[in-house]
Each structure stands twice: as structure tokens, then as C-alpha cells.
Image (tube, grey):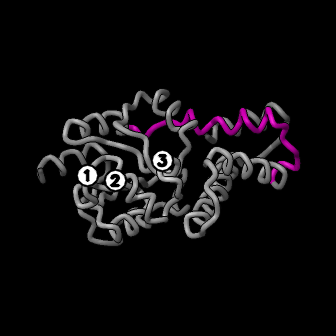
Amino acid sequence: MTEAVELYVASKGITVDAPEFARQWRAAYALETARRGSSHQPFIPLATITLEALKVLANARLSMKLTDEEAERLNGVWRQLRPWPDTVEGLSALRLIASCATCSNGSYVDMAPLAEHLGIAWDAVLGSEASGFYKPHPQTYLLSVEALAIKPSECVMVAAHQKDLVHARSHGLLTAFIKRPDEFGGVGLGEELEPTSDWDFVASSLLELAELVRKRV
């Protein structure tokens, strides 16, 4: 995402702290989804939220108004994100044990191309758009589990963000915390290094998680 911002602003002859711009963009959409997840507002896809957040941020940080075409093109960066080094191999290992599905706030329009771009084969793409609710709304978790035709106690929510795990556990799901020290692109930027609760699984990679789960089943 940072590289896309850097390329775009360079083409316009603008100087900007691209990593910080990317973090602020991410924070802006996350704030809006959290607000909607805790309210009764009608559901709108995340792709729409990230697009509007981008337009506002570009105006505030770059002092420019993006055209619809420019905004749509830059917003497409969510479909080309780079995976963590262990992601593809780790998910493949986990899928040998059980079905793996997303429980993401991401839009179908982004999640499907992203999976193809990364070479990830999900068993299902669930979460906000499948449920019609954003996390932390209970239905985001419960309807996603229901779609897999299993009980919450048979489902493991995997996340690098422990607030997500708090909510998942409160609805009966098992939990797995994955440590991602470089989550925000640097030290001291909000990354979560240690577990804050007694999660069912704690690992430093999806490969390690697969080993832990294999020992449990």
C-alpha cells in the first residue's frame, strides 16, 4: 500500500510521508467501520468507506482533490497487498486440518482479487459483507460461523488484533493470537507484541499455529 502511495504522489510531484499517509488512511476507515459496527446504520461495503476516506485524506494531507478515476485507481491498492512471508504456506497447512475462511471487514470486490493476487484459496469469504455487519457487531462473527455449518466452539478466530479476539471469545469462538511485530510498518506504532489474555493459541506465524492446532486435534 505504501509503495502505491509513493508512486502516485511522485507522479504528481508531491512530497509526502507515504507510510504515515497509509497508516492514517487505514486508521480513518477502521474508525468508521468500528463506529458502524456499534450502531444501527445501514451497511455499506468497505470499498466505499476506504474510497471516501482516501478522498478526505488526500484533500487534507496532499491539498488536492482526487478525480473519481484517480481515487478509484489508488483505492484498488487493497487488492494488491503483499502477504506476510508465512501466509500462503501457513494457510495451506491449516487447510489440511480444517476449512479456512475470512472473517474480514473487507469487501468482496477487494477480497476475491486479493486472494487471487496472493495465491490464497479460501474455503469461504465471510465477515462483514456476508453478514451485513461490521465488527465488532456480534452478527459478523455468529453469521460467519453459521455459514460454515459449525458451532462457535468449533471455530477458531485468528487475528493479530486482540480486540477482535475479545469479541470473538465473548460469542463462544476459540481464539488464536498471531504476533505481527511490523504490523504498522515500524516500532511503537501500535503493534501488539505479547498476548493480553489466555488465548487458546498464541503463535508467531500461521505455520506455527498449524503445528499447535495439529497437536490439539
Residue 199 is situated, as x and y percent measured from the top left of the image, at 28, 66
For the N terminus, give its image quadrant.
top right
Residue 76's place in the image compared with 144, above or below, is above
Residue 76 in magenta stretch: yes
Mark 3 or 2, nearer chain start = 3
Pointer 2 local density, CA inside 10 Å: few below 14, some 14–19, many at least 20 = many
Instruction: Label 2, secondary structure: give it.
Output: helix
Q: Callout 1, which amino acid?
A: Ile
Residue 21 horizontal/vertical position (percent): 70, 50
Q: Which mark is residue 145?
A: 2
Task: Give the amino acid at mark 2.
Answer: Val
| Stretch of the chain drawn in magenta | 61-85
Q: Which mark is residue 130?
A: 3
> Within 10 Å of the Cα at label 3, are there few (<14), some (14-19), or many (20+) other Cα atoms?
some
Residue 35 vertical position relative to residue 157 in the rendered view, above or below: below
**Mark drawn on residue 161:** none
Q: Is residue 216 left or right of residue 171?
A: left
> Based on the displayed image, in which of its 4 quarters is residue 122 positioned?
top left
Report the residue at 30% width, 45% height from top: 206
- Name the image quarter holding residue 80: top right
Image quarter for residue 31?
Answer: bottom right
Label 1: few (<14), some or many (≥20) within 10 Å?
A: few
Q: Is residue 172 above or below residue 15?
A: below
User: Residue, x 67% and y 35% (percent of image)?
Assistant: 4
Marks 3 and 2, how far apart at CA: 11 Å
- Disc 1 target residue: 150
- Type of residue at label 3? Ala
Q: Nearer the viewer, residue 126 or 85?
A: 126
The answer to the question of whether label 2 and label 1 lie on touching residues, with beta carbons closer than 8 A, is yes
Q: Secondary structure at mark 1?
A: loop
Q: CA distance from mark 1 to mark 3?
A: 16 Å
